[in-house]
Amino acid sequence: MTDDTVSEVRKNEPPLHILLVVEDDGEIGAFLTDALHEITPYHPFHVTNAVQALEAVATITPSLFILDYHLPGIDGLELADRLRTIKGLESVPILMLSATPPSRKALQQRGIHFLAKPFDLGALLEAVEQLLPKKPG
């Protein structure tokens, strides 16, 4: 098989997991979604604010949320709280990214995992793998 054939086969396979990336910085959001799409079998969706994230979960059910802490309007902690009130999303893991994190207590109380910006791509991929629910089988 050529690389193009492998890419086409991969695109036609159903994604194992959907990842919702909420990042208001367009360059960082594009980097995250491009890397996750190219390196993993997962299907990342990128939105730039909490309102778009809440609209997105009306039509998709993510297996993982990757949230920036400093979002316009509603910050990442408040968004996490709102997402956890939605039926079916109560236990979806959350990975928060930020150069200036919320308090450790706030993260621990919500069961949110944290990765500091700037981050190493390998560390991000490792965190994603650790947080995603394992498929039975």
Image: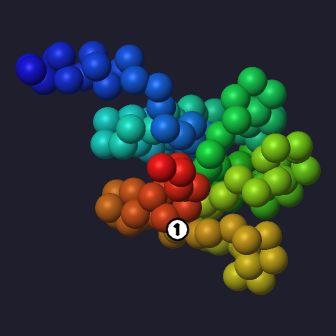
Q: Residue at x 77, y 83 (%)?
A: 105
The location of residue 16, given as percent across then percent down, is: 49, 38
Q: Residue at x 53, y 49 (%)?
A: 135
In the image as oriented, which residue stretches furthest toward the bottom?
105
The location of residue 79, given as percent across then percent down, is: 80, 51
Q: Amino acid at mark 1?
A: Leu
In the image as oriented, which residue stretches furthest toward the front?
137
Q: How is the image coloured?
A: rainbow
Q: Camera-side residue: 41 or 124?
A: 41
Q: Residue at x 82, y 53 (%)?
A: 90
SS at badge 1: strand
Judged left or right of residue 37, residue 131 is right
The location of residue 129, given as percent across then percent down, is: 45, 58
Examine the rendered structure and indicate whether residue 11 appears above or below residue 32. above
In the image as oriented, which residue stretches furthest toward the left?
2
Q: Residues within 10 Å of mark 1 (few under 14, many from 20)?
A: some
The location of residue 97, given as percent across then percent down, is: 57, 60
Q: Which residue is mark 1?
A: 115
Examine the rendered structure and indicate whether residue 134 appears above or below residue 103. above
Q: Camera-side residue: 134 or 105?
A: 134
Judged left or right of residue 72, residue 13 is left
Q: Residue at x 79, y 70 (%)?
A: 110
Examine the rendered structure and indicate whether residue 111 appears above or below residue 105. above
Q: Camera-side residue: 95 or 51?
A: 95
